[in-house]
Amino acid sequence: MIVPANAQVMADLAAHGAYVCPLDSKHVGLARPKMLVMYRPGGQGRVFGVDAVETVNQQIDGTREATARTRQIVRDGEPLDAWQRPWTVFHLREAGAIGKITPGIQQGRYLRLDDVLDALTTDHLAVPTLDEAFPARK
C-alpha cells in the first residue's frame, strides 16, 4: 500500500516505528499488506516491511489486538483506545527508498507487491490505476 507522508505520519514513524491510520480498516483483513510506501512531496518515497497490523476499537481478521507498545500512542493527549473511532496501526521496518513515484497521491491505496519490489530496483514506482492494480474489479 502507499500512503502520503505528512507531519503526523512522520512523527508517528519516528516515535513508534508505526503508521497509524485513523480509520475503520476492514479491508486490511483481505489485503494483508506486506509492504508500505510513504509518498513524500516531491515524488520520493520510503519503503517499509509490515511486521504486524494491530487494531484498536475494532476486530478484523488477520490483525492482532493492540499491544502495550501500541497503547502508548496518543492523539491530543489521549491513548488511541480512549477514542471512539477505530484505528489501525501498522508496525514497520525500513526496507529502502524509491527516488521517483508518479503520479503524486493524495490518499492511500493498495499496490501490487511486485510493483513495489521492482521499484526498489529501478528507483521508480508508477502508481497504477485501481483497475490496473486490481483487474478483477473490472
Image (tube, rainbow, N blue to C red):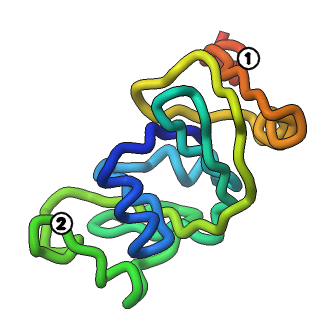
Q: Quadrant of residue 116?
A: top right
Q: Mark 1 points at which residue?
A: 135
Question: 135 or 5: nearer the eye?
Answer: 5
Q: Quadrant of the C terminus?
A: top right
Residue under the point 32% across and 69% down: 56
Closer to the chain start, of discs 2 and 1, is 2
Please state which of the two labelled residues, at mark 2 or mark 1, is closer to the viewer: 2
Residue 55 vertical position relative to residue 116 in the rendered view, above or below: below
Q: What residue type is labelled 2?
A: Arg
Give the secondary structure at mark 1. Answer: helix
Please determine whether, in this image, residue 17 is positioned above or below residue 122: below
Residue 123 position by quadrant: top right
Left or right for 65, reference 104? left
Q: How crowded is mark 1: few (under 14 residues within 10 Å), some or many (20 or more)?
A: few
- Side of 99 relative to 81 (left or right): right
Residue denoted by label 2: 75
| Structural distance between the alpha carbons of marks 2 and 1 | 38 Å
Q: Give the label on residue 6, or none.
A: none
**Quarter holding the N terminus?**
top right
For residue 107, what is the image quadrant? top left
Q: In this view, does 53 lie above or below 101?
A: below
Give the structural element (helix, strand or loop) at label 2.
strand
Residue displayed at 65% across by 70% down: 51
Dot 2, how many residues are within 10 Å of its Cα: few (below 14), some (14-19), or many (20+)?
Answer: few
Q: Which residue is drawn at 43% across and 78% down?
A: 65
Give the percent coordinates (x, y) of residue 41.
46, 31
Locate residue 40 relative to residue 103 in the image: left or right: left
Q: What residue type is labelled 1?
A: Pro
Q: Is residue 59 left or right of residue 118?
A: left
Q: Which residue is drawn at 77% across and 28% down?
A: 124
